[in-house]
Amino acid sequence: MQVTAESKFIGLGVAGNFAGHLEQAGEASDFVAVVVRDTTAPKALFPFYVPGHPGQLGVFPLSEKAILLPEAAVSGDEKVQIEPEVALWCELEYVGTQVVAIHPRAFGAYNDCSIRRPNAKKISEKKNWGEESKGQAANLLPLTGFTAGCELDDYRIACYLERNGELHVYGVDSAAIDYSYFHQQLLDWAIDKFNHQQDEGPAEHIQGLLAQAGYPSHALISIGATRYTPFGETHFLKPGDTSCVLVYPASRYSESDIREAIRTRQFGPDVSALLQAVKTR
């Protein structure tokens, strides 16, 4: 299945669901005042697409083929990084306006491409700068459940940057099951944020955004970025690069298999591959 602008959904991301990523992205200080009951818990749910929103969040940002750099990134005033993630395509179940259940139905490779803006007041200010500012693989893979032993448990997240014909490891190849919150624990946490997260610090009032979107039947939820390699932490996107995020079954492919698949542009049907050309207007 594919997610398009015609799909009735809200786009949300999970901040701080992989140990060490926020520190590498220079964002840990944003969440100092955020109170969490569990120190391993994610920090917030943030919006990247809200249909019906009058501002930037109302622009459909997803692309399977390209990342369009903001002008400030071309001049070097701002820096943009790949954020390799798994995204879940979910059905939302409501009682009145309250979300009471989240049912993941599919998953795939996702690029939560982000501008590094140290002075941004909200997480979303770094996330959606217009069309082609995010990445979602065309081939989402079916998910029959989201409990221990589900299809996603076998998958890993790989991230590479192709520059001048060379392939660089950009993100640490990571197992999906190594997310801090996963399975029902993640869903329970997200339900709480859907219903109770307030407009505080870098976080936003999700209930208000759901209302703006008309209480959509679905959500695309990116569940957190992996850690960067030293190369990924210190290199930023330039025109001519290709961003590569792949979600692949570890029982069937090795890291070298995935690198070869990127080089040949040949991917098995059980791999969710997202290759985006980095460009300017």
Image (cartoon, rainbow, N blue to C red):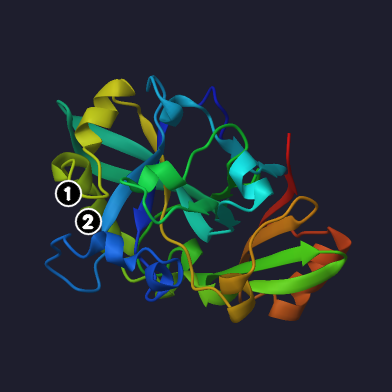
Q: Quadrant of residue 101?
A: top left
Q: Residue 167 in the image: x percent, y percent?
A: 79, 71
Q: Quadrant of residue 242?
A: bottom right
Seen at 58% across and 38% down, the residue is 62
Q: Nearer the viewer, residue 135 or 187?
A: 135
Residue receiving disc 1: 192
Q: Nearer the viewer, residue 142 or 167?
A: 167
Amino acid type shown at disc 1: Asp
Q: Nearer the viewer, residue 99 or 168?
A: 168
How many residues crowd around disc 1 within 10 Å: few (fewer than 14), some, or many (20 or more)?
some
Q: CA distance from mark 2 to mark 1?
A: 5 Å
Q: Residue 195 in the image: x percent, y percent?
A: 16, 40
Identify the mark at residue 189; answer none if there is no mark.
Answer: 2
Seen at 50% across and 27% down, the residue is 59
Direction from residue 274 to residue 241 in the image, left or right: right
Amino acid type shown at disc 2: Trp
Residue 230 seen in this snapshot = yes
Do the numbered discs 2 and 1 sit on residues whose CB atoms are within 8 Å?
yes
Q: Residue 230 in the image: x percent, y percent?
A: 59, 80
Residue 271 seen in this snapshot = no
